[in-house]
Amino acid sequence: MNVYMKNNQAKSPLLFIDLNNFAAYPTLAVGYLIRSLRTAHYAVNLLSPLALGVPAFARDHAEGWKDQLLRRLYFSSHPLLNRMHDRLRNLHSRWLSHPHPLMIKEVHEAIAKRPAAILISAYLTQYEMCVEIGKVAKAAGIPVLLGGPFFNLSNVTKEWLKIEGITAIVGGEVDFTVADIVDTLLAKGDLSQHKGVFLPNGKNGGIVPPLKALSMLPVPVPDFTDFPWDKYPHPIIPTMTGRGCSWGACTFCGDVISANGRTFRSRGITSVLNELKQQSETHKSKDFIFLDIKLNSDLDVWNGLIDHFQEFVPEGRWIGTVHVNHKGDNGLSAERLKAAKKAGLTRISFGLESASQSLLDEMKKGTKIEKCSDFILAAHAAGISVRTSMMQGFPGETVEDLRQTNIFLKKHFHALDRVRLSLFKPLPDTPFDRMYQKNPDKYVSLKQFKWDYKLARGLYRYHPSRNKDYRKAKRELLKIVYAINKKPLTDDARQFNGMM
Ligand code: SF4
């Protein structure tokens, strides 16, 4: 029994505020933490935006002309549009980060009930909401722990620790230690004794090393019972077979520097299959989303899912993200993809980024464009809906790179269901950051470069994008992406659309 239960039986429970509104399914990390706290006998009340009627941010929704107009403005680099473009971008990010009135109201009411402590799970776009929670909590004298996927990055944490009312920031995988941290918080002890805890006075417990004992995680499984299942358009259960990525080398990748993405660790197939069965029975759903950043990292697990998913969840369906690595077996042959479809794999996502091999090599993507082509065609032929993420404006991207990408997309138009196109975003602590620091002169195309640590991203202007031919090729790319994203989806794929 923890200190809180021994000494404060009559105190109010903990308030857990999950600010994640980017997905129409429970937040996996929060499910793990709630399970750990309840195992340590803490009472927890969960506040989640969707439960209050705050609409979830939909990814990959059916696109219309407004989406294309916004995309054209967002990607525009016409010299005359640049200023307006910056203002629109700022407005858009302020709109995204603006706290929803319903959420503010509910936070005030929940804090008025005087929880013993508040735990916040936040993304970096939710700064304003955290400021609001900190203000109300401080006035009420209630301690606050703030956590999220990027608070293991010291420059980011330093910025966020400036928020008044935040007692400490927790950055790292604390699945097994969160109850001890809360014990110390409630006992007003020294929180810097805990690894991964950072205090406004500069004291901290140091970096938490990546959690090794992943096979112990599902005992018991994450607790999703407080999430608003009735509000989800389709009940889909999130899960993860491992953390990190077995490739882990892409120079731009923010996933592998996040708290639980550092180094690859697999849970092993047995615990995963048992969890699928148990969660399916608990939540009366047979549909799963695998949140692994590379689901084919551990081929035993990938093949195990294909060979045994239906034994554990008969008639179940699943979706996930893979990496089309070119060295050795990647588990994505036409035969394996056919078997995966039979095993319930309904939609698959992968990062194409670009169809220019030289640019892919520059990104250290670890893939060959011919392999990506084979994969797309084989997955489509197997009846799996294929979605890809792509990047525009990677340093060094030329008109020719864009042209190659456009040709590739046209050739695979029939086999691609959705494309998520983003602008290159430099992230701190990535290999790109280190390469830039070492040799900024190599990146002549990035003008006025500076870091915004509050949002954990680099701000810059991409010089080649002022060129007329480059802009023409980019316009064509946007047109093809829009045409793909307007395509109707099969019934199965539609139910999973917007989830990845
Ligand atoms: S394969 Fe994907 S998850 Fe792995 S490092 Fe590259 S972008 Fe990141």
Image (tube, helix red, strand yellow):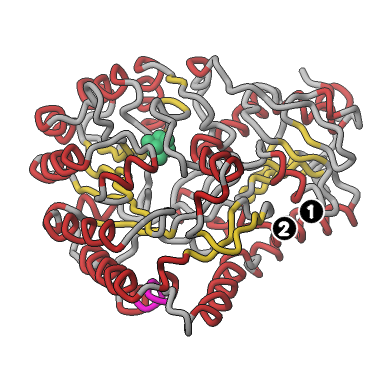
Residue at x 54%, y 72% (from the top left corner): 89
Q: Give residue 23's position: percent from left, percent from top.
A: 46, 52
Left or right, 284 with reference to 473: right
- Residue found at x 43% / y 25%: 242
208 shown above or below 393: above
Height in image: 482 above or below 301? below
- Asked whether mark 2 and ligand 1 are closer than 8 Å, the reply comes as no
> What mark, if any, has residue 107 been given in the picture?
2
Q: Residue furthest front?
A: 441
Q: Residues within 10 Å of mark 1 (few under 14, many from 20)?
A: some
Q: Is label 2 in contact with label 1 (beta carbons under 8 Å)?
A: yes
**Where residue 215 appears, x then y in whole percent?**
48, 15
Q: Quadrant of residue 93?
A: bottom right
Q: Nearer the viewer, residue 397 or 73?
A: 397
| Up-down relation of residue 404 to residue 461 (above or below) | above
| Residue type, label 2 | Val
Question: Which secondary structure is most common in the magenta stretch?
Answer: helix
Residue 3 in view in this figure:
yes
Q: Residue at x 24, y 26 (%)?
A: 330
Q: Is residue 323 left or right of residue 450?
A: left
**In this picture, residue 380 sits left or right of residue 208:** left
- Magenta range is 69-73
> Which circle marks residue 111 in the picture?
1
Residue 203 location (% of width, % of height):
86, 33
Which residue occupies the foreground of this view, 26 or 425?
425
Q: Secondary structure at mark 2?
A: helix
Is the residue at mark 1 in contact range of ligand 1, meaning its CB lies under 8 Å from it?
Answer: no
Q: Rate crowding at label 2 as few (under 14), some (14 to 19) or many (20 or more) other CA atoms within 10 Å.
A: some
